[in-house]
Amino acid sequence: MNFSSKLLENAVSEFGRLPGVGQKTALRLVLHLLKQSDAEVARFTSTINQLKEEIQYCHICFNISDYHECEICTSPKRDHSIICVVEDTRDVMAIENTNSYQGIYHVLGGLISPMDGVGPSDLKIDGLVDRMRKQDVKEVILALSATMEGDTTIFYLYRKLKEFNIQVTTIARGIAFGGELEYVDELTLGRSIATRTLYERPTL
């Protein structure tokens, strides 16, 4: 794609680095911004800067939050004896949109993937184990994507959690293998949470 301006080309290149944004979409976004008033562009850039500078991660569950502890972890209306383990914040949002889960969460920050150089120490697994020791937890739901990485992570977590006197469950597989939670429709995901099953695998 030929550009009439180096500044335009640089801006399109930066937008194009966003996931799911191709060069043509990036160009449309940049041209849209150019048509906006200075005040609107300033508000847009200020919001992004504020997000980057002020966003926090809940020190309990590691979900993205405005505060040191997120609203879910501090809510007295939630069942704190049930922890749903998910890959990232997008999965928390997907499950919350089903309105079928009233427990709390633990965000791993990824999945075990040796091919990508991601091991257990790169995730918030130690934080989960620490919560098991400090909190009165009765059940841990492993709500991870139906992928090879998801299954590997589930198996690893199950072995780590076996020492605790708790139920370890997984969401029902109404989700096709290879599917990621954030793309599953709310009805299917809600049913998968409601019909979760005990997880049992033989120790290797």
Image: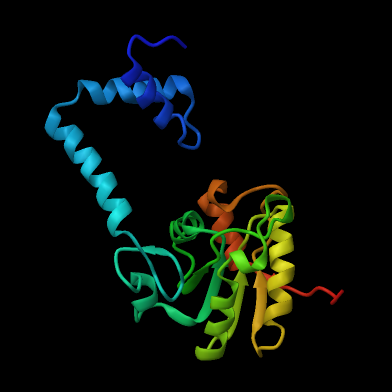
Q: Residue at x 65, y 58 (%)?
A: 118
On the image, the x and y values in percent for residue 199 come to 73, 73
Query: Dividing the picture into quarters, in which one does residue 64 lie?
Result: bottom left
Indicate whether 47 appears above or below 3.
below
Relative to 178, residue 143 above or below:
below
On the image, the x and y values in percent for residue 14 come to 40, 31
Q: How is the image coloured?
A: rainbow
- x 87%, y 74%: residue: 204
Rendering quarter of residue 108: bottom right
Q: Is residue 13 left or right of residue 152?
A: left
75 displayed left or right of 177: left
In this view of the protein, which residue sits in the foreground, 108 or 46?
Answer: 46
Q: Position of residue 134 (x, y in %)?
A: 51, 90
Residue located at (69% from left, 64% from top): 153
Furthest residue toward front: 6
* Residue closer to the observer: 2 or 97: 2
